[in-house]
Image (spheres, grey):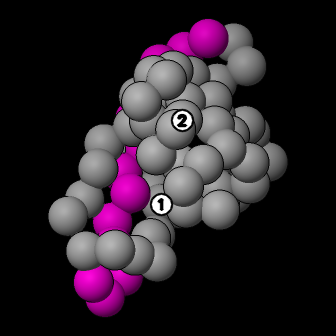
Amino acid sequence: MSRTIKVANADNEPSYVIAEPEQSIDGPYTFFLTNSDPVNHVAAGRFEGPDGESYYAQDQDDIEWLIQLQ
């Protein structure tokens, strides 16, 4: 099941990351922005885009879910 994660960049501009399971509902997951750019999950609440820009999860429930993936 996919999950939508509210994020913001360093300038506090909002966006969303989609977490899409690769083969099963338990992951592993592929992450991408709503504009289809892939992002890497580099820390519990942080993603990095292809241009090096960081995006930070805004919701504590999402951060806790991401911690479980590590």
- Which residue is identified by label 1? 31
Of callouts 2 and 1, the N-terminal one:
1
Please report contact status of discs 2 and 1: CB closer than 8 Å, yes or no: no
For label 2, count other residues whose C-alpha is less than 10 Å away and answer few (under 14), some (14-19) or many (20+). Answer: some
Q: CA distance from mark 2 to mark 1?
A: 14 Å
51 to 29, vertically: above or below: above
- Identify which amino acid the numbered label 1 is placed on: Phe
**Can the viewer see residue 35 in this picture?**
no
Helix, strand or loop: magenta stretch:
strand
Q: Nearer the viewer, residue 33 or 66?
A: 66
Residue under the image location 36 percent in, 51 percent down: 18
Residue 28 lies, in percent from the top left, at: 46, 77
The stretch in magenta equals: 12-24
Q: Is residue 11 visible?
A: yes
| Mark 2, residue position | 63
- Which quadrant of the rendered structure holds the C terminus? bottom right
* Picture residue at 46% right of the left edge, 46% below the top: 65
Pinpoint residue 35: horizontal percent, then vertical percent: 38, 47
For marks 2 and 1, give the one nearer the viewer. Answer: 2
Q: Is residue 35 magenta?
A: no
Q: Label 2 amino acid?
A: Ile
Residue at image location 44% in from the left, 36% down from the top: 62
